[in-house]
Amino acid sequence: MELRVLKYFLMVAREENITKAAQLLHVTQPTLSRQLMQLEEELGVQLFHRGKHNVTLTEDGMLLRRRAQELVSLSEKTKMELQHKEEMPTGEIAIGCGETKSMAALSEKMVSFRQKYPLVQFSIYSAIADDIKERLEKGLLDMGLLVEPVDISKYEFIRLPLKEQWGVLVRADSQLAEKEFVTPEDLRGVPLLMVRRELVKNELANWFGDSFDQLEIAATYNLIVNAAFMVEQGLGVALCFDLGAVFENLRFVPLTPRMETGSVLVWKKNQMLSAANALFIQHIRNTI
């Protein structure tokens, strides 16, 4: 498969119309149709359902679209890393970030780094740790800012100093909102919004102790903003850590006994780093 043909395929998948895609790609419609047919022959699958006026992806086509997007993104990222202007580092540093206050500290380092190396760009991908690790393995991200607990055996890392405090996000009219802290007993019989990651669930299970198996789980979530909307509508209270975000009509109440979470900036062991990535890592080590 040629990258050029994959880009043709992605354009047709996006537009769902070969004629329109051909115009955007500045090729003739017969040429584009032939390239798509040759791609299907090469892969031995049908990629499109062809109608009179549009085309839609088959299941195989949807799988190829995901893989093609990754391949094209990795190709463009590699080109940027290999570009140089005299001795000034250039290119893109792609970082996956979880929801954590440590993003403020990392952002501060990004600002001071770009003051020294203004030709370097940052690309930020927000997700939970499991998604970030998957993209690190595929080479789509250079680094990941991961919220613990997380398995970092495959990575080099820098541990960031800030700790997150766990608590519950509740409606302002809830009885829990009147408390200074909440205990495991306070949450018995209360519908809870639970984080999805298994490692984090295990940490919370330790905090709840024997009552964990009797909890009422109303929903699971991976992004606190979505959880906040569910809390506001009355689905339950969200177990989360305090990001300092101000949500209208909601209040964060800390857990007691106190429960804290750290974060780490990681990158793959034994990988060749671009000049920009190596300099950024060194910059963080020197300034943290």
Image (cartoon, rainbow, N blue to C red):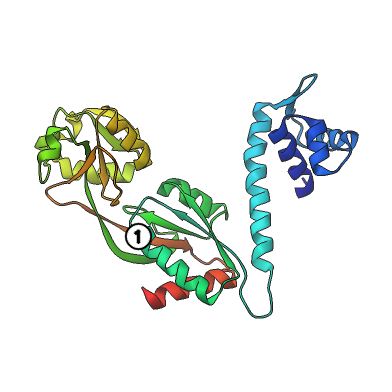
- Tally of numbered tags: 1
Q: Residues within 10 Å of mark 1 (few under 14, many from 20)?
A: many
Residue 81 locus on image (x, y percent): 64, 66
Q: Is residue 52 above or below residue 75?
A: above
> Image quadrant for the N terminus?
top right
Snapshot quadrant of residue 225: top left
Residue depicted at x 77% and y 20%: 51
Residue 274 vs residue 46: left or right?
A: left
Residue on which disc 1 sits:
102
In this view of the protein, can residue 70 be seen by the observer?
yes
Residue 211 locus on image (x, y percent): 14, 34
Residue depicted at x 28% and y 33%: 231
Residue 183 vs residue 202: left or right?
A: left
Snapshot quadrant of residue 207: top left
In this view of the protein, can residue 2 be seen by the observer?
no
Given residues 192 and 173, the one toward you in this image is 173
Residue 62 locus on image (x, y percent): 64, 32
Residue depicted at x 19% and y 36%: 172
Q: Is residue 259 above or below residue 19?
A: below
Residue 170 locus on image (x, y percent): 21, 37
> Image quadrant for the C terminus?
bottom left
Residue depicted at x 15% and y 27%: 189
Residue 129 vs residue 261: left or right?
A: right
Type of amino acid at the residue the image marks with label 1: Ser
Residue 226 vs residue 255: left or right?
A: right
Please, what secondary structure does the residue beneath circle 1 have? Answer: helix
Snapshot quadrant of residue 146: bottom left
